[in-house]
Image (cartoon, rainbow, N blue to C red):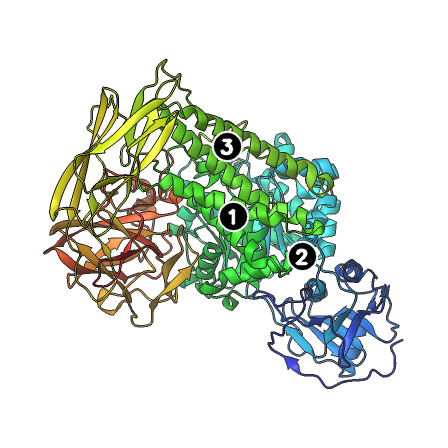
Amino acid sequence: MFRKKIKFSVFAIITFFNPAFSQTTRSNLLWTLPQYITVKSNTKQFTIADGGKAATIYVDPEDWKGVIRAAGDLGDDVRKVTGNAAQVLESNTISKNAILVGTIGKSHIIDQLIAEKKIDVSKIKGKWESFIIQTVGDDLVVAGSDKRGTIYGIYDISEKIGVSPWYWWTDAPVKKSKNLYVKSGTYVQNSPKVKYRGIFINDESPSFSGWAHAKFGGINSKAYVHIFELLLRLKANYLWPAMWGNAFNEDDPMSPVLANEYGIVMGTSHHEPMMRAQKEYTNRKKEVGPWDYVANADNLKKFWTDGLERNKAYDNLITIGMRGDGDVAMGKGDDAENINTLKKVIADQRTIIKNVYHKDPSEVPQLWAIFTEVQRYYDAGLNVPDDVTLLFCDNNWGYIRRTGPAKELKRKGGLGMYYHIDMNGGPWNDRWINTTTIPKLREQLNLAYQTGIDRIWIVNVGDLKPKEMPIDFIMRYAWNPTTLSANQTFNYLTDWATGIFGQEHAREIADIVSNYSKYNLMRKPEVEAPRIFSFVNYNEADRVLKQWRDLVAKAESLEKKMPADAKDAYYQLVLYPARASAGVAGIYIAAGRNNLFAKQGRTSANDYAKQANDLFELDQRLSNRYNDSIAGGKWQNMMIDVHIGYKQWSMPRQNTLPSLSLVTPLTEPTLGVAVEGSTDAWPGAITKAELPQFDMLDKQSYYIDIFNRGMGIVQYTAKTDKPWIKVSSFEGVVAKEQRISVTIDWKTAPEGAANGIIEIAQGDTKVPILVNILKKAGPVTKQAYYGGFSGEFSIPAGKYNAKIAGKGAKWILLPGLGRTEACMGIYPVTAPSATPDKAPRLEYNIFLPRRGGTRVCLGVLPSQDVNPARGLRIGVAIDGGKPVILDARKGYVDTFNEYTPANLSHSLVLKALPPLGPDYALVSRRQPRRNEIFDNLRWLDVDVNVKKPGMHTLKVYMVDPEIVLERIVINPDNRYPSYFGAPDIQHKAASGVTSEP
């Protein structure tokens, strides 16, 4: 029986507070409740553990099995933290100083507290997945509105006492404390903003499947219970199970039973309708017959009916519709025929649902995945009943294809999103390592949520590892996407690092994790190639390599400071992804340099071949450590994806180095010369050696490489024919290569344009190098500006001179987004389209030394055609000129063949893509693995007429709100091609002095 009286203390309803606690307790931006745990005792607290003793946990034996199981986890979590377990009793007879856990309407303990008015559950009763945590007299009460609500409340305590949701999946250390207390009060957790929040284990071979077979004997219930627990600890609720040759319900019949007991909503992927895995079909293909609804409807209906009958007692979210067998389009590829077939398929599936569940289909949760070719069917007018959730998708690389259509915002089934942080398939694989940044996730998921996509968020996470960080963010963010602004994404990372590693090194860890994912986003490992970055212009490849090396140095240095119990987690979450990613980037840069130097005849080409080989071997050692050593071999096979040597979208059979060349040295020491700005080498090249132009405004320094094509030592001299040409070395000896720098003494250089010669000589072998300079004063202006006399220049979008708000919209800074420091986006993303006269705009002061045609290139993130009936547009103008409206789909990669003439003729909304226009070096459309998706940037170009040289104002106008601007390049110069464009140099007002941000 209950105790007859429970002392009731006055308490405050806590809405928000952020006190300072020890490292055991903390506050987190995306925690659904503030921190209520403390390790300091006072009289107005509930004691979880103190003096070697822990409070008893009581749970009604008639409550949900998942609740009872989670209560057991909490008891053990108290042990992990304090060394003393909290005893868990399944009993309604309770003692003092207890933790009382239960579900409203399912727990006699909770229902009696409500009846006695000891707790007020009016704010959560009848709500989806809500809970309260309340100190009541000498007790602590955890009451949930439903099964998962209670479970979430239990795990909320677990995390706040110091047990990370990732304690098992990343070996995250537990924050130890002998004493644990709950501050007096009531903590109310409202329902999540996104109803279904979950992950899809996919592309699971070879790594996840190899790991599961080694550890559990297969992808079975022993493996899945760890996924179920992780999801619940993250307050998620939904799972699409592994399906590459796996059948969740049949491989281990306990898997669906345990999923239901734990409290996980199960579904199937976008091409597996009616709770049937593809493997279930392929296992009985002879019995069922062809996957062809036109020819084999009766057998397929029986197949689907059997699947629903088997799973009807469980909590399911049913995928309806039909695609081809094996994640392809169905039928013979005729959209009109497929649309008619799908209408019949969906009608019959709804009848099956009605017959199996004995209720109206509108009462059974369903989704229709608008994936790949299905998007075309929807755009052509196909739809499903109003109670079915429309599951929109991204482009497989993390950019959503549609925002919530206005016509669908009131549909009963709502709108959902299928999103990828892992991809096996077109446009290219992206699966080995995490390449997704938190700012990108926040930008895209905010766009989805703000436009009404809030019923389902299901995320393809591949093997789950090593995508832990983005999984953590998405599941937490989905609870309430309004809590995190664009300028708080790094704060989230710091909180995430604190939750796993403690506060001491959290910011350093956040910085490493933020940067490795950003550098991977610049160029994902699977789409690396030896000639992506320029080796001769702007020191581009060297700058990229330095970024990676600096990052690795930080990560390795910090590893030495990690306590023993954090080292395994640190390797998995920080060191391995940073170091291994850097290694792959280094392999391709070394290979590219080897290829170039071999062409030039440099013997040092062989050194770079060795460097590539050494990094290749290091990659294997790093993987071996992950698979075999950390956590006592717990993660065997988890890191065996092939990730080096891609030739097409699909995974190669084995890791292979890019092509390397070896140079046989000449028998005698032989001079070779190469100069910045050219891939040629002298003597021997047809062209004449010439450095890029120097000018007094930018005060450039360029290099000359002097190298040896043979054995022995080259003795060289360097002399100039003009005293104002300065070289860093006038003579020397070179065994392999030496770089000398060239600068100009602007005080003694003549006014205007001038030239001179640098002669590099070895005996009678002489290489003249032309030097061109321009000594001309910069403009007199009161504001900082970009531009100069030497052609191409770049402007970071966030370095504007003026930002003018429009009617109901404005440009805002999006820190950390994109390939550089920040981007500019529109707030709110739901702003209506605008004409330039009413639109928000950005203004940039630029100096253009010549009149006439000027090419302006806007680098925007590869936003999809999210509202095709309206368009995707941005405006550009110079000074007071009429704005030019650009179709921001220029360069759009049509991965799913939506924009063919045939499909356009059937679509109700799609419009033909704009012409690509000129192929300039910055875009490099004809180069291997260069497009807007692989580059993570789309270039929009427009030619404008400049009436006179001097200072001008470049204006960029919002027309449609989803476009994100990262970078502007003016007058891209094909003579000096690069991946990023010229480095940005901002000139200070009036003085002409430069500053490099």
Q: Amino acid at mark 1?
A: Ile
Q: Amino acid at mark 2?
A: Pro
Q: Earlier in the sequence, mark 2 or mark 1?
A: 2
Residue 165 - label: 2
Q: Position of residue 320 (x, y in %)?
A: 55, 49
Q: Nearer the viewer, residue 431 or 160?
A: 160
Q: Are marks 1 and 3 in contact (CB under 8 Å)?
A: no
Residue found at the far bottom of this picture:
10
Q: Which residue carries the number 3 mark?
A: 644
Q: Is residue 271 visible?
A: no
Q: Are marks 2 and 1 in contact (CB under 8 Å)?
A: no
How far is mark 3 from mark 2, CA to CA?
A: 32 Å
Q: Earlier in the sequence, mark 3 or mark 2?
A: 2
Q: Which residue carries the number 1 mark?
A: 421
- Work out which quarter of the rendered image holds the C terminus and state it: bottom left
> Residue 920 is drawn in which quadrant?
top left
- Under circle 2, the secondary element is loop
